[in-house]
Amino acid sequence: MPPLDAPPVSGPAPAPPPVRPAAGQFATDVPALLLRLDRNPFHHGSLGAARSLGRAGIEVHAFTEGPRTPLARSRHLHRAHPMPAAEGDRDAVVARALERVAERIGRPAVLIAMDDMGALTAARLAGRLRGHFLLPGPPPGTAARLADKAALAGLCRDAEIPHPETVAPGSAAHAVAAARELGLPLVAKWDRPWLLPPGGALRSTTVVTGVEQIRRLYAATPRAGGAALLLQRYLPGPGEDWFFHGCFAADGRLLTGGTGRKELSWPPAAGLTAVGRWRDAPEVARAGVRLARLLRYHGVLDLDFRRDPRTGAYHLLDANPRPGAQFRLFADGRGTDVVRALHLDLTGRAVPEPRPVPGRVFVAENYGLLSALRALPGGPLPVPAGGAGLETAWFAADDPRPLLTMAGGWLRRAAGKAVARAGRRS
């Protein structure tokens, strides 16, 4: 050891400690790829994700149905890639498509599933994809347990979350008997709706009012692509549909999220959120966090609840291991939403402390218009609370082309349906 009065030893100065990025500072050198396998060119959730990440300076890629879809026309989308073919070994086809896109991007990208089929496929392929993509890592099988409507009842039991009584009929006679036991109206849904054939002939959820409907639905089982029919007790109460969105870290922490209520849905009573409002519902938030902890969930979680007005209990109806289409409702005072939080988390950046903005309203203009027209006889329509903020699915002053493309597509589709109806009458 040198004496205390010895001259300092010359040499290189110690390296300064690395500078940690500030919370909310994005890794803009890491792109994002939006994975959606359901062929729905009017999926506004994917557009919302592209806009959210693109405005943060992130290079956004996405699978699209073609170059003239609303998402492909967004100025915030860096590049559109052809959707994987729907035939053959789905996992193998999607894996090859993802690997081709990874080669084009040229560096690891955050992979964000935007529909159930995408989330389930990404979870099955996680081991193969990790060299190319950054993606959340919940325990194996978690995504499938959440998305399967039949398995959800068991999860609710384990998490002590209310869930409506649900029956999986094994025959047409069993379905009729279950309908009589549950009472009409009731809810009919398919346990794995992502297996339903495209085209919308079989809706994922239907409010059933008669026994003949039950028989017809059960008779359609051979055409359901492997999905099984479920019958569920109907919980009454318009205006009692609630939802939870949250992004969870690998250690189970809720990074950001919120609870809201459906003001209008399409189709009515059993459809997606046409108009929603950010409203505090502590019981719903606690249920979402409890379920995520039970599953050791990592990533974005979207849950749908219905409050039973007779008991006040919030029943969990649906769980999705990905962002819901209305996720932008929960953009907080800093602009952080669950998609931005996921990108921050997967790139090792800190997510800033949430600044909730209760009262914000989300409107999907196309579905909101249809819902409003249907709701007009029933009373006043929901409008944004003073100064709370309005989030529109399609309109954006800095990105107008998707709205115009959507409107043109809807008009063409409506005209085609009108021509088809006229042809059937003639």
Image (cartoon, grey):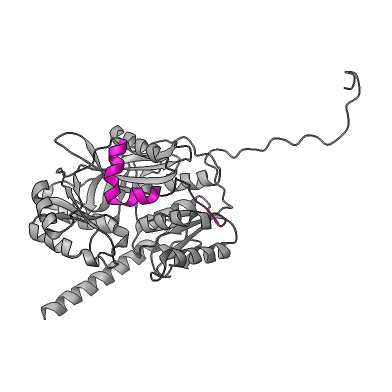
Residue 92 coordinates in the image, percent (x, y): 46, 66
Query: Could you tell me which residue is drawn at 42 percent across and 68 percent down?
Result: 89
Residue 69: quarter of image: bottom left
Residue 247 coordinates in the image, percent (x, y): 42, 43
Residue 327 coordinates in the image, percent (x, y): 37, 48
Give 321 or 127, whichever is nearer the viewer. 127
Magenta segment: 130-159
Query: Could you tell me which residue is drawn at 48 percent across and 48 percent down?
Result: 136
Give 14 or 161, whichever is nearer the viewer. 161
Q: Is residue 235 above or below residue 221?
A: above
Query: Could you tell me which residue is drawn at 20 percent across and 47 percent down?
Result: 166
Q: Quadrant of the C terminus?
A: bottom left
Q: Quadrant of the N terminus?
A: top right
As for residue 109 lying within the magenta part, the answer is no
Residue 405: quarter of image: bottom left
Q: Going by the picture, which residue comes out furthest to the top?
A: 4
